[in-house]
Each structure stands twice: as structure tokens, then as C-alpha cells.
Image (tube, rainbow, N blue to C red):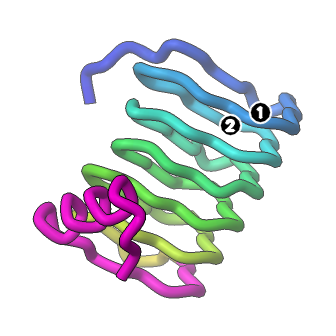
Amino acid sequence: MKERINAFFGKDTEFEGNLSFSGSVRIEGTFKGEIRSEGVLILGRSALVESDIRASHVIISGEVRGNVVADEKIEIYSPASVTGYLETPLLTVEEGVLFEGKCHMISSSEKEEKRLSLISGKVK
């Protein structure tokens, strides 16, 4: 990833609320709330995130409690701990990661079909 980091929440940072951004954000501290982005979210080794996350690309090395939906991919690296539901077309999980929950690998065509049904109000 060569994209520049737009914001950084350091190890001693605690934040509660809603976060929306474009570009890239790295969190090393504690975050509770909701995260929405069309960019890249990086959760470092010291991150503790209790949040529902929707982003294009999510990289996890810390602890996540909540649902993670990524339009492009989710990467999870040791020593990460993830508890919740994952939805993405591409998933990488490194050996040593603790994952408790469900994962749905959604294809591009399935994602577009789901988006169109939400727009038209016809949910399957």
C-alpha cells in the first residue's frame, strides 16, 4: 500500500463516535462507534476497535469486535483478534489470527445485485 496516511490515532488515543473519511486512516488506539469510508482503514497491533466498519480495504493487526464489510478486501495479520461478521470479495488471514464469527465471500456480481436490490427496494 503506497497511499499516504491522512489521519493517525495513536496508541494512547481513545475516540467514541462516528468516523468517515477518504484516503487512508491508521488506528493504534481505542475506537468505539461506527467507521465508514471508501478508502483504506489500517488497524495496528495496539488497536482495540468496537465498531461496525465499512470501507474499501481493511487491514487488521489489532483487536476488532464488530462487523467488517470491505468492498475490495480484508487482510488480517497476527496477532489480530476478530469477533464478528466479515463480508468481502477477497480475504487474507495469516496464521496465528484468532477469528470468531462468520465470513461471507461476496463476488462482484453478487455485490452489484445486492446494491441494485437495495436501490429498488427489493431485498432478497
Q: Looking at the rendering, in which quadrant would you find the C terminus? A: bottom left
Residue 23 location, quadrant? top left
Is residue 30 at all visible to an observer of this figure?
yes
Q: Looking at the rendering, in which quadrant would you find the N terminus? A: top left
Residue 37: percent from left, percent from top: 48, 34
Name the amino acid, label 2. Glu
Q: Is residue 66 highlighted in magenta?
A: no
Name the amino acid, label 1. Lys
Residue 12: percent from left, percent from top: 86, 30
Whether residues under marks 1 and 2 lie with C-beta atoms below 8 angstroms apart, the answer is yes
* Residue linked to disc 2: 28
- Residue range (magenta): 98-124
Please, is residue 101 above or below residue 74 in the view?
A: below
Q: Residue at x 26, y 50 (%)?
A: 72
Measured Cα–Cα span from mark 1 to mark 2: 5 Å
Q: Residue at x 31, y 19 (%)?
A: 3
Which element carries disc 1, helix, strand or loop?
loop
Residue 2 location, quadrant? top left
Neighbor class of circle 2 (other Cα within 10 Å; few <14, some 14-19, many 20+) is: many
Residue 29: percent from left, percent from top: 77, 38
Of residues 57 and 106, which is closer to you in this image? Answer: 106
Mark nearer the N terminus (1 vs 2): 1
Q: Which mark is residue 11?
A: 1
Q: Which mark is residue 81?
A: none
